């Protein structure tokens, strides 16, 4: 007669300390299921040591809900997780990522002294806010909806003096300026309603790119839009700059050949913003976050005159019907002299010389008087900055040159080098799949 195999009930034989170690390796869903096995596991599965860890994993810096009395309840973190899940459970797959990025963004703004931008950030959605309806044809990506439960857009995104505070970043060249601010949930809800109406009225067809504004400049017609469907090379959630002047009669149907991809998703856009704020090459103009980026090595010094350059790609003004095939770039130049430089090195800019080349090898030279109509004087402790723009038919190009200066004491002329600076466009996505175009040509 074969001996019977004995089974060991670990719930009976293992001490609480070891069971808690085992339970610390299961997911929140499995932990809830374990609690249904027996009374002992039910009590252990609600332990603070387990749920405090899960709260920090899924809800990051959530605070425990208030307990009765001074002592911490042995299940306060279980109830905290329950309460957070009740409010945000539909976003549990992305909340920690989105919240973590917002924490980095807030830290970056504080580190750069951008308190004016920080103050524009609204709080989270409240329970009184209307819920965006979800249809089979149209949905708002979860990471964007999740973000509204952390910061419901920006309010008062400009100061009384006209300073723009949009998180989309400021670009200003001549009469053109753009600084999109993050729109609120209510604004997106309104735009979504317009889009649904156009779909119901059959003003849109399935081949058109359906978008909704996510950021908008209060002073211009520049927006950052998010795709709500997949068309051509665009995928749901993709984000791009757009000028509303170049949108067809249908509010959301975009007849272009394509647009320049700003971000793969809202999470990607938040990641770029967080990284930008922590990058010393990112420029702030007064209180405004600038889209200009200064490569630290892009500096040249000649006769105590320091020249540094920052660049930006203007995607909303590139490849549009007014500039077909051309990519627009802006550059921001600062000319300065250290305060400890000799006074007899003071000078004035008279002329400029540029060498401009695209990635096809086409080279142009430009000579002219002054810079954007100015003839700045550079003295110890002073600086002068200006912005201008250029365009290429290729996606990349560079510029270099020098400025003709005159010494204000000796009246001798000399050249000040401008370092070579490179410009690169964002990826371009087509509204029609290239494979479809190939079939049409057959």
Image (cartoon, rainbow, N blue to C red):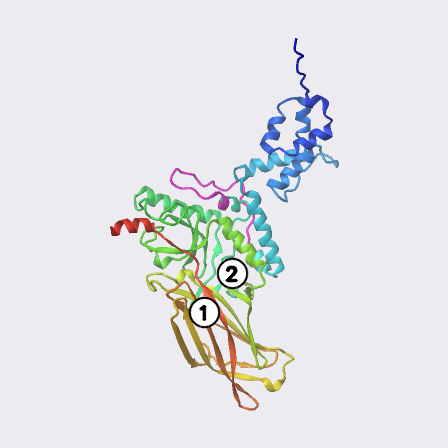
Residue 120, picture quadrant:
bottom right
Residue plotted at (57% across, 90% down): 409
- Element at badge 2? loop
- Queried whether the magenta region covers residue 139, the answer comes back as yes
- Compared across the picture, whether 355 is left or right of 160 comes to left
Residue 133 position in % (x across, y down): 43, 39
Q: Which residues are magenta?
A: 119-144
Residue at the farthest bottom position: 410
Which badge, 1 or 2, comes first in the chain's sequence? 2
Residue 432 in sight in this render: no
Residue plotted at (59% across, 60% down): 114
Question: Which sits in the foreground, 366 or 111?
Answer: 366
Few, some or many C-alpha atoms within 10 Å of disc 1 (few <14, some 14-19, many ≥20)?
A: some
| Residue on which the image places disc 1 | 398
Residue 395, picture quadrant:
bottom left
Few, some or many C-alpha atoms within 10 Å of disc 2 (few <14, some 14-19, many ≥20)?
A: many
In the rendered image of this protein, does residue 37 appear above or below residue 125?
above
Residue 12 position in % (x across, y down): 71, 21
- Element at badge 1? strand
Residue at the farthest front position: 1
Residue 442 position in % (x across, y down): 24, 50
Residue at the farthest top position: 1
Residue 369, picture quadrant:
bottom left
- CB contact under 8 Å: marks 1 and 2: no
| Residue on which the image places disc 2 | 158
């Amino acid at each position: 007669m074969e001996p019977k195999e004995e089974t060991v009930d670990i719930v009976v034989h293992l001490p609480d300390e070891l069971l808690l170690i085992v339970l610390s390796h299961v997911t929140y869903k499995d932990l809830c299921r374990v609690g249904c096995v027996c009374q002992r596991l039910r009590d252990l599965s609600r332990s603070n040591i387990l749920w405090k860890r899960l709260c920090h994993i899924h809800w990051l810096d959530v605070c425990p809900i208030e307990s009765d009395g001074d002592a911490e309840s042995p299940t306060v973190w279980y109830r905290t997780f329950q309460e957070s899940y009740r409010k945000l459970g539909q976003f549990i797959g992305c909340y920690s990522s989105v919240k973590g990025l917002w924490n980095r963004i807030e830290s970056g703004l504080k580190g750069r002294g951008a308190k004016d931008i920080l103050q524009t950030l609204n709080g989270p959605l409240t329970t009184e806010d209307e819920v965006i309806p979800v249809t089979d044809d149209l949905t708002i990506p979860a990471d964007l909806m999740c973000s509204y439960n952390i910061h419901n857009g920006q309010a008062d995104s400009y100061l009384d003096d006209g300073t723009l505070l949009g998180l989309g970043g400021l670009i200003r060249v001549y009469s053109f300026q753009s600084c999109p601010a993050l729109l609120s949930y209510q604004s997106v809800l309104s735009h979504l309603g317009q889009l649904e109406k156009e779909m119901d009225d059959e003003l849109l067809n399935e081949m058109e790119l359906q978008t909704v504004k996510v950021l908008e400049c209060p002073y211009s017609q520049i927006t950052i839009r998010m795709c709500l469907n997949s068309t051509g090379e665009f995928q749901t959630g993709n984000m791009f700059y757009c000028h509303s002047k170049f949108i067809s009669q249908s509010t959301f149907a975009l007849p272009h050949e394509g647009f320049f991809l700003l971000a793969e998703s809202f999470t990607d856009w938040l990641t770029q913003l967080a990284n930008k704020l922590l990058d010393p090459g990112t420029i702030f103009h007064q209180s405004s976050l600038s889209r200009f980026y200064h490569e630290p090595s892009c500096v040249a010094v000649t006769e105590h005159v320091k020249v540094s350059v920052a660049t930006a790609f203007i995607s909303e003004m590139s490849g549009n019907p007014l500039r077909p095939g051309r990519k627009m770039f802006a550059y921001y130049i600062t000319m300065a002299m250290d305060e400890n430089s000799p006074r007899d090195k003071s000078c004035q800019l008279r002329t400029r010389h540029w060498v401009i080349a695209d990635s096809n090898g086409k080279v142009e030279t430009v000579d002219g008087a002054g810079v954007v109509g100015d003839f700045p004087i550079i003295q110890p402790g002073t600086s002068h900055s200006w912005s201008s723009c250029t365009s290429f038919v290729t996606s990349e190009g560079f510029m270099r040159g020098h400025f003709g200066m005159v010494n204000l004491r000796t009246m001798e002329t000399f050249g000040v080098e401008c370092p070579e600076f490179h410009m690169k466009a964002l990826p371009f996505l087509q509204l029609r799949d290239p494979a479809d175009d190939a079939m049409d040509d057959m």
